[in-house]
Image (cartoon, grey):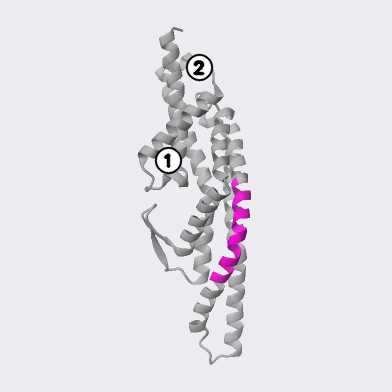
Amino acid sequence: MTLFDLGAAQLALFTLYFARVSAFIFVVPLFSSRNAPPALKIALSFFLALIFITVNSPSVDSSLLDAAIYVPALITELGIGLILGFFVSFIFAAFHVAGEHIGYQMGFAVVNVFDFASQQQVSLVAQFLFTLAMLLFLNLNLHHGMIATWHGSLLLAPPGRVALAALSVADVVSVCQDFFLIAFQLAAPLMAFLILADISLGIIARIMPQMNVFFVGIPVKIAFGLFMLASAVMAYGVVLERGSTRILQDVLMFVKG
């Protein structure tokens, strides 16, 4: 292999690194927002790919110069990056789903706000928990674990040497299970207390028929729900840390196959 072929093969390998990292960044919630400039995402992907390929010092395969091998490998790397970013987004989606159920139970079914990131109407409580999750994610330095997951995926499944068909379906199911488990852990305590509030109001309605429980119950449920939500905020950091660690481990197991 000539010096020119070696340089071309190194460039082809770098583009595979760049494809996986950039696909990951464009999907993960912290960077997928429309408020994040595309130039920033591309620059961050470029420098991260440069750092990863420098640290890993992978062996260069001259077969990457063959278009029949390089193009499927590039498509595979884009697919892996999108899948991994989608899995990591489950961490924040769990908070959003929990907020939707909590808000509905509190009586905020039609209380929506406009989310500039997604350009959609979202539940007020869901938007609050989603923003809280992003702040806690950065405050707890969990983004360091996310970068370590990128690096670990490149070590366990080097670019150009893995096929999407080799990825395990069982690991996909495991990630989805952890997603629903995190959402349940977030929503279950408040849902239980709000259901007890409904039962208490129903008992009051039976004891005191002359009272308009429907008129009184709405502000009571809202005040009780906000109080319980404020009390549970401190525990959400623990749930986020444990859930993030579990999902990031599942991501590495998924890549390992």
Across and down, in percent, residue 201 comes to: 58, 81
Reading the image, the residue beneath label 1 is: 26
Say whether disc 1 or disc 2 marks the residue closer to the N-terminus: 1
229 in magenta: yes
Q: Amino acid at mark 1?
A: Phe
Q: Does residue 27 sit above or below 77 in this rendering?
A: below
Q: Is residue 32 visible?
A: yes
150 in magenta: no
Main SS, magenta residues = helix
Magenta residues, start to end: 226-244
Across and down, in percent, residue 156 comes to: 59, 29
Across and down, in percent, residue 214 comes to: 50, 82
Q: Residue at x 58, y 90 (%)?
A: 208
Q: Residue at x 50, y 87 (%)?
A: 212
Reading the image, the residue beneath label 2 is: 60
Q: Which residue reaches farthest front? A: 139
Image quarter of the C terminus:
top right
Q: Is residue 257 visible?
A: no
Q: Amino acid at mark 2?
A: Val
